[in-house]
Image (cartoon, rainbow, N blue to C red):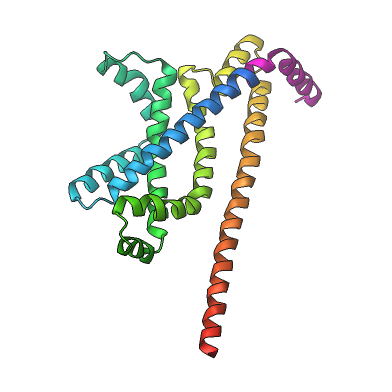
Amino acid sequence: MDFQVIGANIAKIMSQYWRVFLLEGLSVTLELTFISVLLGVVLGTVVAMLKMSRFKLIRFLVSVYVEVIRGTPILLQLYIFVFALPGLVTFVKLNYFTWTAIALCINSSAYVSEVIRSGIQAVDRGQTEAARSLGLSSGQTMLRIVLPQAVKNILPALGNEFIMMLKETSLASTFFVGDLMTSYATVRGTTYLGFECLVIVGCIYLCITYPLSKLVGLMEKRMSGDTSYRKRNINRKRKLLNKM
């Protein structure tokens, strides 16, 4: 393997096709990721609320939804939404990109819902009881007291979900929606330089995911540091009270 030739080929490909990789492929990948995670968080919040409902039937149906989505491969879900559903829902005319975004959104919502539910349940129940005793309704308590604290707890997990979804959008290339892997297939078919194109796409993914993973790790350390600081503060107050 001649690394000089490979390096020269990579430089040549980037000089000729950087628009295909960066402006087209990367932009579509980021667009799919943002749409999937953003709508997934909204839908996942609704699913999390329903899973904590007082009604057993609703909890059962939502649990089935979550388990089915989490228990089946995402590629299978993409095939269902892109090929099967358009034939069943003939009155809705959507392109491959939209169906792919919907499938990724639903997949993300199942995972995000569990993150949000655990974040809500991690909030001290005494705060909910105190808010209700002050006259706040259950909806007001959830929106003003519980959710703001839960969001702070689950931010690192949502960051990891964004990184995972960024990589999972590569499966959308199966339907040629214009993402990075679609750009790879296009340039490879033109240049017949498959390895060099893979190196370029891999470096682009790495340049996006690596800083994001470091940022998420920093957030996790910050959150754990805040928690340990609060615990130390509480212990210090308890010691002072015991001395008194």
Residue furthest to the bottom in view is: 244
Classify residue 170 as left or right of residue 91. right
Q: Position of residue 135 (x, y in %)?
A: 30, 59
Give the residue displayed 49% in from the left and 32% down from the top: 168
Q: Which residues are magenta?
A: 1-21
Give the residue displayed 63% in from the left and 9% down from the top: 190
Q: How many numbered marks are there?
A: 0
Give the residue displayed 29% in from the left and 51% down from the top: 52
Q: Position of residue 178 (x, y in %)?
A: 53, 17
Specify the quadrant that holds the N terminus.
top right
Q: Is residue 109 above or below residue 176?
A: below
Please tell me whether the stretch drawn in magenta is mainly helix, strand or loop.
helix
Q: Nearer the viewer, residue 169 or 109?
A: 109
Q: Position of residue 40 (x, y in %)?
A: 41, 36
Q: Residue 136 falls in which quadrant of the image?
A: bottom left
Q: Indicate whether residue 156 is drawn in magenta.
A: no
Q: Is residue 74 above or below residue 130?
A: above
Q: Is residue 27 above or below residue 238?
A: above
Classify residue 220 as left or right of residue 97. right
Q: Nearer the viewer, residue 195 or 23?
A: 23
Q: Position of residue 221 (x, y in %)?
A: 60, 57
Q: Is residue 108 visible?
A: no
Q: Nearer the viewer, residue 106 or 77?
A: 106
Q: Is residue 61 visible?
A: yes
